């Protein structure tokens, strides 16, 4: 028998002589445990994996758990590290050797670390002294992590809407972190994982996986399986959907993997045309399509629409949506008959759009005293009679403002002056029909008001999609190019294709939570913004992406003497260079250079890209904290975003506990239980609070405090719940 131990870590293989019996193997393992218990356990794990291989179905090597580098993370004693390449040098095997930091000292003004090489989980004998600046921390997936979040930037254009979140992180660790905030609460996951083309489009253990790697497929499956197992815990088992895009290189293996991880799901695969002109390949068919797997859980189902997605003409049209005049006409609706319904509507004379809505006027205030904004005219509900009888509008100012924002109110011009304008709106029944699919928006007029029609028939979408809007060039690359002039991102998804895929499941869920942990250029969040604009939804996206620099750009940067962790290097990472600025540009309507984005959105909802979206977003970076500092309440600022996310990511975030407790719109935190009375009173005054975080290491105090909470407020113990969530047995997460 021969045990080739190094292969356990390089290929995930155990080479056994067929004549060796299982009992003999167990005897040898017992002897090995006396000399090297960790190695024996690792071998036992590999044997268990071989014994459990399926006779039928998808079999693949579950490779050594991944490890990632954490540029920018401070090096601490006890850390595992790689040695960074010398500036200007080409990559070498030296960068993949793993060391443990034994001590850190300052020598001649420089921080120097004493390190030991780690081989097969066994520390070597030779100590080396290396400059700390030449080390980068490594996180292995077998290690427990204690994450924090640091806010990098926030954009607020959505009033009280919840915040979309973008997390810069390795996605496996980000998924672990999200288990604390969103277990069982995610309504939809949309991912576009690396296609494993062999063109160095993804890494395994810090090395690009190339076309000639004989373990290319099993590495890809092992990578994806670990993440999908965590995603399964995040999805709402009662009603949710998992959507995965892929091409022909891995769709067969992916389908089997999905069936094995999610046997309870109802799975379908759609073929969608993304490049009608085809991709030329010598001696092969010209590929025009990709595939999308849909896995439906619990009550999730496809919502019928008027479009079967086949590219054929839509169903026959029915009646157009009906616009109503906003001014009340009945003689009883004169000014003063009802409160809050006599006010000015300010119309921009140049664009003939509604500029803003004034506040209600008391009955004794002359309407002529109202001064409109510059360039605007004040329009009041006046009867077209010689006396210009003052009437009422059919809606209060707040209701009308909401309709204007969504394009559900408009102005038509019939002459000059204020009397020449007619204000119209969509009745609540029509708005509801748009939201539930009984009516569809077909476009917008020149003033931003929606155009649409009712549909009397709906159909289920077919499994072959052929839509002009799904062209990845015109609806993906060109849109990203308009948002980020001069910046390149390879093969972005069609914005409208992602929008359509999500609409089939989220149309009736205006407050859905959507996760994408292969965020790429940020198309999923952009699609959520469009869905929200179409029906005034409050859906929110959670995006996760690393800040990897492309191989081509890495070569240029290394030639300039740069390396990971340098600011100039990190600025060209995918998140900082593409994802964040794309999402910011989509919301604000401005390019990174501060210029209005050119072009218009098309298809379901047409308007200028420069209009942006009424959305909120916050950008975070995931950090790695020391558990003792967390437990002693010294890292509350980095744990605070997790509490806010768990409470729904809206309203004020509690950033510190200088007063011993605090209560925001949706949650509260108390660290000084002597102030419980004040805390409970504040909770009662905030009816939307659903969670109370109680900082204590005393079981009895926690139970007693929990009993005092108002009905409907869930008690969560800090930091016990946080630490337990992240003290993850490595094998549980990676097997």
Image: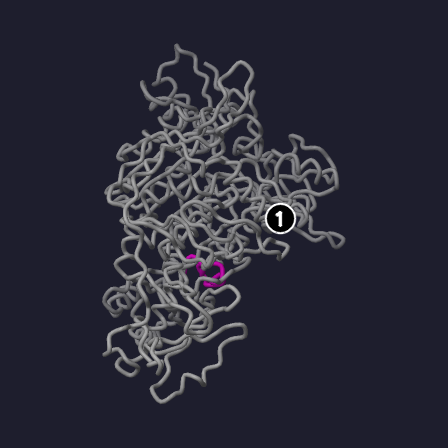
Magenta residues span 631-644
Along the line of sight, the residue nearer the viewer: 566 or 192:
192
Residue 33 seen in the current view: no
Check if residue 643 falls in the magenta segment. yes
Q: Residue 367 in the image: x percent, y percent?
A: 41, 83
Choose between 455 and 193: the one closer to the eye. Answer: 455
**Residue visible at 50% across and 46% down?**
522
Residue 697 visible in rendering: yes
When the figure is inspected, residue 414 is found, relative to residue 33, above or below; the finding is: below
Q: Is residue 679 left or right of residue 521?
A: left
Q: Position of residue 358 (x, y in %)?
A: 42, 76
Question: Which quarter of the picture shows residue 48?
Answer: top left
Compared to residue 52, the image places residue 676 above or below, namely below
In the rendered image, residue 14, in percent from the top left (x then y), is placed at 45, 20
The count of marks equals 1
Q: Quadrant of the C terminus?
A: top left
Of residues 230 and 455, the one nearer the viewer is 455
Residue 451 in the image, given as x and y percentages of width and height: 38, 53
Q: Is residue 216 magenta?
A: no
Magenta region, main secondary structure: helix
- Classify 10 Å Cα crowding around label 1: few (below 14), some (14-19), many (20 and above): some
Q: Quadrant of the N terminus?
A: top left
Mark 1 lies on a secondary structure that is strand
Q: Residue at position x 66%, y 50% from top?
A: 567
Q: Residue at x 69, y 38 (%)?
A: 85
**Residue lying farthest to the bottom in this orientation:** 364
Residue assigned mark 1: 103
| Furthest-top residue in this view | 19
Quarter occupied by residue 54 = top left
- Residue 175's place in the image compared with 13, above or below, is below
Left or right position of 336 against 271: left
């Amino acid at each position: 028998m021969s045990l080739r131990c190094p292969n356990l870590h390089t290929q995930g293989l155990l080479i056994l002589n067929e004549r060796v019996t299982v009992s003999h193997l167990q005897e040898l393992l017992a002897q090995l445990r006396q000399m090297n218990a960790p190695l024996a356990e690792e071998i036992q794990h590999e044997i268990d994996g071989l014994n459990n291989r399926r006779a039928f179905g998808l079999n693949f090597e579950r490779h050594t758990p991944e490890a990632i580098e954490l540029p920018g993370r401070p090096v601490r004693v006890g850390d595992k590290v790689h040695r960074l390449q010398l500036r200007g040098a080409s990559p070498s095997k030296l960068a993949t050797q793993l060391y443990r930091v034994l001590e850190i000292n300052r020598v001649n003004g420089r921080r120097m670390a004493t390190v030991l090489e780690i081989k097969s989980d066994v520390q070597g004998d030779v100590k080396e002294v290396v400059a700390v600046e030449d080390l980068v921390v490594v996180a292995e997936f077998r290690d427990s992590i204690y994450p924090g979040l640091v806010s990098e930037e926030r954009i607020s254009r959505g009033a009280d809407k919840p915040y979309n979140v973008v997390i810069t992180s390795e996605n496996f660790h980000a998924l672990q972190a999200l288990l604390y905030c969103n277990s069982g609460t995610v309504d939809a996951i949309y991912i576009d994982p690396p296609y494993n083309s062999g063109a160095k489009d993804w890494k395994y253990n810090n090395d690009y996986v190339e076309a000639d790697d004989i373990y290319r497929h099993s590495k890809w499956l092992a990578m994806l399986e670990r993440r999908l197992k965590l995603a399964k815990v995040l999805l709402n088992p009662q009603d949710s959907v998992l959507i995965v895009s892929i091409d022909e290189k891995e769709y067969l293996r992916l389908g089997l993997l999905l069936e094995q991880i999610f046997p309870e799901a109802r799975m379908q695969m759609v073929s969608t045309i993304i490049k009608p002109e085809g991709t030329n390949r010598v001696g092969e068919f010209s590929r025009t399509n990709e595939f999308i797997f849909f896995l439906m859980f619990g009550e999730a189902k496809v919502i019928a629409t008027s479009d079967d997605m086949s590219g054929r003409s839509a169903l026959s049209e029915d009646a157009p949506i009906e616009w109503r005049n906003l001014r009340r006409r009945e003689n009883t609706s004169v000014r003063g008959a009802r409160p809050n319904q006599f006010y000015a509507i300010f119309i921009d004379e140049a664009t003939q759009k509604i500029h803003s809505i004034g506040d209600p006027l008391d009955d004794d205030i002359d309407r002529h005293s109202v001064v409109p904004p510059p360039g605007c005219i004040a329009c009041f509900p006046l009867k077209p009679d010689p006396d210009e009888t003052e009437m009422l509008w059919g809606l209060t100012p707040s209701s009308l403002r909401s309709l204007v924002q969504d394009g559900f109110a408009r102005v038509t011009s019939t002459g000059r002056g204020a009397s020449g304008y007619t204000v119209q709106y969509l009745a609540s029944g029509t708005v509801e029909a748009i939201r539930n699919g009984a009516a569809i928006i077909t476009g917008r007029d020149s003033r931003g008001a929606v155009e649409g029609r009712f549909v009397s028939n709906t159909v289920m979408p077919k499994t072959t999609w052929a839509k002009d809007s799904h062209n990845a060039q015109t609806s993906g690359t060109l849109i990203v190019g308009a948002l980020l002039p001069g910046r390149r991102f390879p093969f972005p998804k069609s914005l409208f294709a992602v929008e359509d895929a999500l609409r089939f499941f989220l149309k009736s869920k205006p407050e859905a939570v959507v996760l994408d942990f292969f965020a790429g250029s940020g198309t999923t969040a952009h699609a959520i913004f469009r869905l929200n604009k179409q029906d005034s939804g409050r859906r929110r996206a959670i995006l996760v992406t690393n800040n990897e620099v492309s191989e081509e750009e890495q070569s240029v940067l290394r030639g300039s003497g740069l390396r990971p962790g340098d600011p100039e290097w990190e600025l060209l990472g995918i998140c900082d260079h593409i994802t964040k600025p794309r999402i910011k540009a989509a919301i604000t309507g401005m390019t990174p250079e501060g210029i209005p984005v050119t072009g218009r959105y098309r298809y379901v909802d047409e308007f200028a890209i420069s209009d942006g979206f009424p959305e909120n977003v916050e950008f975070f970076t995931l950090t790695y904290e020391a558990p003792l500092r967390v437990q002693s309440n010294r890292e509350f600022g980095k744990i605070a975003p997790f509490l806010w996310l768990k409470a729904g990511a809206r309203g004020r975030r509690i950033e510190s506990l200088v007063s011993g407790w605090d209560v925001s719109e949706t949650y509260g935190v108390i660290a000084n239980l002597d102030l419980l009375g004040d805390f409970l009173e504040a909770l009662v005054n905030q009816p939307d609070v659903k969670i109370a975080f109680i900082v204590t290491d005393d079981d009895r105090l926690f139970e007693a405090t929990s009993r005092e909470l108002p009905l409907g407020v869930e008690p969560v113990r800090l930091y016990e719940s946080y630490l337990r969530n992240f003290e993850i047995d490595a094998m549980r997460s990676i097997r």
